[in-house]
Image (cartoon, rainbow, N blue to C red):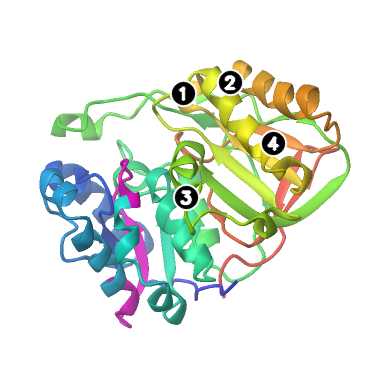
Amino acid sequence: MIKPPKLYPGDKVATISLSWGGAGDIPHRYQAGKKQLEEVFGLEVVETKHALKPNNWLYQNPEARAEDLMEAFADESIKGIFTNIGGEDSIRTLPYIDLQIIHDNPKIFLGLSDSTVTHLCCYKAGLTSYYGTSILIGFAENGGMHPYQIEDIKRTLFCNEPTGLIQPSPTWTNEMLCWEKPENQKIIRKLHPSSGWRLLQGKGIIEGPLIGGCIEVLEFLKGTDFFFSKEDFEGAILFLETSEVKMPPENLRWILRNYAALGVFKKIKGILFGRPHDNQFWKEYDDTLLKVIREEEGIHNLPILTGMDFGHSAPTFTLPYGVKGRLDCDNLKFYLPEAPTS
């Protein structure tokens, strides 16, 4: 995998809307996130050609969304690409993606949720990308960015030294304050104390390259040329998280059984599972993971760490694709023992 160069204050980065057009429809929310990128990290922020188009226009023009991505990668002045928000139909951009352009122009790509589609494009192109936050979520956090989120961005995207130990966030939130009301932007969301991460099973220390994404979006990609190959799963640490849709536990069970049928759980080194939205179904999801992997598949030694601070929760840490992760089961610690960027 090619690691893109780290960011420096003063670098130019582009924002992009690859699915939902929330940045165009809720401009004050977008501007709040853009301001944080500029003032907290010292970046020069520009928009791709169609980044602020209305949602209906973006829905009707998946080729234009892909064109924005290709132009941002090809533009040598742009050092990073930051997604504005997720959605549900980035998969419609796939016919217009040129993997060679991505491969030939390594730069940081940051996003989550439906951006899993574009992350797998980067992965197929041999480029490390970053499963983290987005402009309308982490950067436009009500009342300003969480310190945990700021530290994560600095150590992941602005550093080419080994990241080391990733600490759990002491607090989390999923309180929904209507984005369409500008006055809500100044209201700090209610924070809940974190009970920490949970080890469901596993012993010792395991290491492997990180692959994964939003579990619902990965389902969109199964059967396409962009989904992970059997070889990709070999020796990897698989990270998974569920979306704000809050899928019923039985849906998770069905999806995990599909991974079992593919032989995934016998190939990977471990599983990292993100905190569910609103922390709903956390116990049911834990039980489902154990039911499928331990009870049905008879795999008792595969490490499974759940309740982690990535995905559809806030604040989050960032997971770099293809970069080595290390899980110390005995001490309940997770590390990124190599540099996330070049």
Looking at the picture, which amino acid does disc 4 mark?
Ala
121 or 328, nearer to the observer: 121
Judging by the rendered image, the residue that carries numbered circle 4 is 260
Magenta-highlighted residues: 72-91
Helix, strand or loop at disc 2?
helix
Give coordinates of residue 325: x percent, y percent. Answer: 70, 54
Judging by the rendered image, the residue that carries numbered circle 3 is 132
Helix, strand or loop at disc 4?
helix
Kindly report the distance in space between the C-alpha atoms of the residues bearing marks 4 and 2: 21 Å
- Mark 4 closeness class: few <14, some 14–19, many ≥20 residues within 10 Å: some
- What residue appears at the point 36 percent right and 24 percent down from the top-left corner? 175
Judging by the rendered image, the residue that carries numbered circle 1 is 247
Of discs 2 and 1, which sits in the foreground?
Answer: 1
Q: Are marks 1 and 4 in contact (CB under 8 Å)?
A: no
Looking at the picture, which amino acid does disc 2 mark?
Trp
Kindly report the distance in space between the C-alpha atoms of the residues bearing marks 2 and 3: 21 Å
State left or right for residue 109 relative to residue 260.
left
